[in-house]
Image: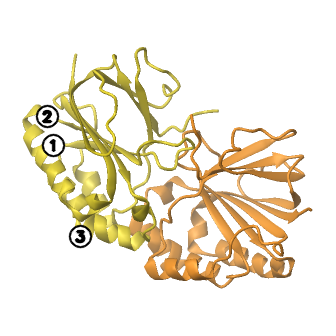
Chain colours: A orange, B yellow
Amino acid sequence: MLANPRLFVFAGGESGRWRVARMAAIAGAPLEAVARIEILGPGEVSTRPAGCRWMLHGVASNERYVVRAEKSELLARQPPLGRPDAGRAALIAIRKSERWWALAQDERREIVEERSQHIRIGMKHLPAVARRLHHCRDLGTAEPFDFLTWFEYPAGHAAAFDELVAELRRSEEWRYVEREVDLRLEREC
Amino acid sequence: MLANPRLFVFAGGESGRWRVARMAAIAGAPLEAVARIEILGPGEVSTRPAGCRWMLHGVASNERYVVRAEKSELLARQPPLGRPDAGRAALIAIRKSERWWALAQDERREIVEERSQHIRIGMKHLPAVARRLHHCRDLGTAEPFDFLTWFEYPAGHAAAFDELVAELRRSEEWRYVEREVDLRLEREC
């Protein structure tokens, strides 16, 4: 069967151009420590890199919470992935609780933005931080996380990125996060 | 790999307890005609029934548009699948356009409910019609549809169900539907 053209795989192991600088389990079980991350894009997802210890799958999809004004601002300000000067990256893998998923759409939006300012906090880091969100919860396989977010930024923005993440972790939205693994990476070559 | 516990498969072919009474391509390409539908639930999804001509995969997920008041009303009024007196069913498979998926959340909600009354129209048919919505767009495989909706109702509600579907097809939301296949079924045994 053909793969979804929006499917990406993060393969943790011995190969890949992103070297793992640090890895932390913020909530719940850790992931096995690895030296590098390989990102497989559409068309490569059936490959299993040599020395791979785990593979996380996710699909880039439509946004679930941003309203028109926010979307237009994001489209105008967000940079692409793959910028030559963005040599740092983060992979933040999240699983939310059953209580989160049982909320209605307006309740989740209220928590995400009106009470936690998730979108607004991210916006403060544009255009420094490029981001791609991958959804895992509606894949056909049982996945360990609901979301994989991939960020790329210049080395000079690393301290500010730590503050972005800390601010989100203090938010009401994060009370619904039951598992979180945070990997920081540096590009080689 | 373990299957998602919310994954269901609709297998069209020669077997299954639901006999196809009629099948119509409302928009876009038809599906190959089949005599019966087998529904495979979590734990059975790797089976391929004998004589199967096509398999449609979908994941039951959180709602994307219903607000709290609507969700509470739905929870209070919607019947379960599998009622002995609900011997009729419909499988409606839909694909929406790229233009739809590029809209922001508030724009999609506005079209779905404020302008098309999708939730309100469905509510008029409770508790007669049981329903389970399956999402296909964020599966790891390239799927022919974005949504599979399965409905079960008593034979006496068949004409009213036709009106439900006709009302939705006249709505603004349906201008974004680029492929739709409608199967009507009768339970045997």
Left/right of residue B136 with respect to residue A167 in the rendered view: left
Q: Which of the marked residues, 3 or 2, is nearer the chain's N terminus?
A: 3
Which residue carries the number 2 mark?
A: B154
Q: In which image quadrant can residue A180 be found?
A: bottom right
Seen from the viewer's position, the closer of residues B116 and B102 is B102
Q: In which image quadrant can residue A139 be found?
A: top right
Which residue carries the number 1 mark?
A: B128
Q: Residue furthest right?
A: A189
Q: Nearer the viewer, mark 3 or mark 1?
A: 3
- What element does badge 1 sit on? loop
Is the same chain shared between marks 3 and 1? Answer: yes
- Type of amino acid at the residue the image marks with label 2: Pro
Left/right of residue A27 with respect to residue A175 in the rendered view: right
- What element does badge 2 sit on? loop
Q: In the rendered view, tell whether residue A139 sits above or below residue B70.
A: above
Left/right of residue A116 with respect to residue A170 in the rendered view: left
Which residue carries the number 3 mark?
A: B115
Q: Position of residue B53 (x, y in %)?
A: 40, 23
Q: Tell me the distance, in whole angstroms, between the alpha carbons under discs 3 and 1.
A: 24 Å
- Type of amino acid at the residue the image marks with label 1: Ala
- Type of amino acid at the residue the image marks with label 3: Arg
Crowd band around label 1 with a 10 angstrom C-alpha radius: few (<14), some (14–19), many (20+) = some
Q: Position of residue B82 (x, y in %)?
A: 27, 31
- Please say if the residues under marks 2 and 1 sit with CB atoms less than 8 Å apart: yes
Residue at (44, 60) in percent of width and height: B98
Residue at (89, 58) in percent of width and height: A19
